[in-house]
Image (cartoon, grey):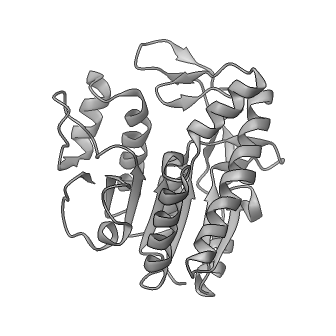
């Protein structure tokens, strides 16, 4: 089977403005000419806006969204509908062959309901209709698409074996697919210049133990906790390294080719 060299997770903040979307789509198209590539995307801010419009309160714990039935309907509509379709159209315009998917398609990401999580603050919290990938999910559809030269673009939604749709954190899903597919590198691109220290400076290189210490000490902010947990899981399951980068400042092609730390980027290693 053709193994992708790269799994790319895009934060939704990179896909909101036309200029950002065009630049990201061009980067994906350029990457697709050089390597097999799977894209996973989130869309937190657009989900927040849609929830506000619908009058549904937003609930999060350490960067993870608490999801009830009404929230899940909004999540599915925004991710699988608006954002995924918009990104696929932009990548197609840029010259690649994208295919829009969710984790529910052909068991790309089979999920189980997530157990209550211990928050950094201490108490355990039930996340509701939120899932965690299980190890026997099948990547066969992704591999078939890659073999035929397509670019899978996966929205962070999945389903249980009995068909219950669940929200899944985009960083968690990207880490799972990177390890399941045997990717050499996972790139998490968003609006932050990597992992920041207490003085607000980018940490150029961080190992898995260092990431665990940051989480335990509470020095990682809420959104970064989920990213660092995803990094540690991907590295534990064989991904070579993870780059957490500012997708507005660092070209995607540079992130694929980098041999070590870059400006505006943290390299997370085993």
Q: Position of residue 198 (x, y in %)?
A: 19, 27
Q: Position of residue 229 (x, y in %)?
A: 40, 40
Looking at the picture, does residue 23 appear above or below residue 46? below
- Quadrant where the image shows the N terminus: bottom right
Foreground: 85 or 222?
Answer: 85
Q: Residue furthest right?
A: 162
Left or right of 98 in this view: 179: left
Q: Position of residue 190 (x, y in %)?
A: 42, 48
Left or right of 23 in this view: 216: left
Looking at the picture, does residue 88 appear above or below residue 74? below
Looking at the picture, does residue 42 appear above or below residue 126? below
Q: Position of residue 169 (x, y in %)?
A: 56, 42
Q: Mark yes or no: residue 179 visible.
A: no
Total number of numbered discs in the rendering: 0
Foreground: 154 or 207?
Answer: 154
Q: Quadrant of residue 208?
A: top left
Q: Mark yes or no: residue 90 visible.
A: yes
Left or right of 38 in this view: 194: left
Foreground: 176 or 102?
Answer: 102
Which residue is rendered at x = 80% and y = 29% of the image? 69
Which residue is rendered at x = 71% and y = 39% of the image? 75
Which residue is rendered at x = 66% and y = 53% of the image? 83
Which residue is rendered at x = 70% and y = 28% of the image? 51
């Amino acid at each position: 089977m053709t193994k992708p060299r790269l799994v790319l997770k895009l934060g939704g903040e990179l896909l909101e403005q036309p200029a950002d979307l065009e630049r990201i789509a061009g980067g994906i198209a350029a990457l697709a000419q050089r390597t097999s590539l799977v894209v996973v995307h989130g869309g937190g801010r657009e989900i927040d806006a849609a929830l506000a419009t619908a009058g549904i309160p937003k609930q999060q714990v350490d960067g993870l969204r608490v999801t009830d039935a009404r929230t899940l309907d909004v999540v599915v509509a925004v991710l699988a509908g608006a954002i995924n379709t918009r990104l696929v159209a932009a990548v197609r315009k840029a010259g690649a062959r994208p295919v829009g998917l969710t984790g529910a398609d052909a068991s790309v990401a089979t999920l189980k309901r997530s157990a209550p999580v211990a928050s950094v603050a201490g108490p355990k919290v039930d996340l509701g209709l939120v899932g965690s990938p299980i190890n026997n999910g099948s990547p066969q559809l992704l591999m078939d698409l890659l073999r035929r030269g397509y670019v899978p673009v996966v929205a962070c939604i999945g389903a249980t074996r009995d068909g219950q749709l669940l929200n899944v954190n985009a960083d968690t899903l990207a880490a799972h697919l990177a390890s399941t597919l045997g990717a050499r590198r996972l790139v998490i691109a968003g609006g932050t210049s990597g992992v920041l220290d207490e003085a607000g400076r980018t940490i150029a290189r961080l190992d898995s133990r260092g990431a665990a210490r940051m989480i335990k000490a509470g020095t990682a902010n809420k959104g970064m906790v989920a990213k660092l947990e995803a990094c540690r899981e991907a590295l534990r399951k064989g991904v070579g390294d993870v780059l957490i980068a500012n997708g507005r400042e660092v070209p995607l092609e540079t992130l694929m080719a980098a041999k070590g730390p870059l400006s505006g980027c943290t390299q997370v290693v085993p």
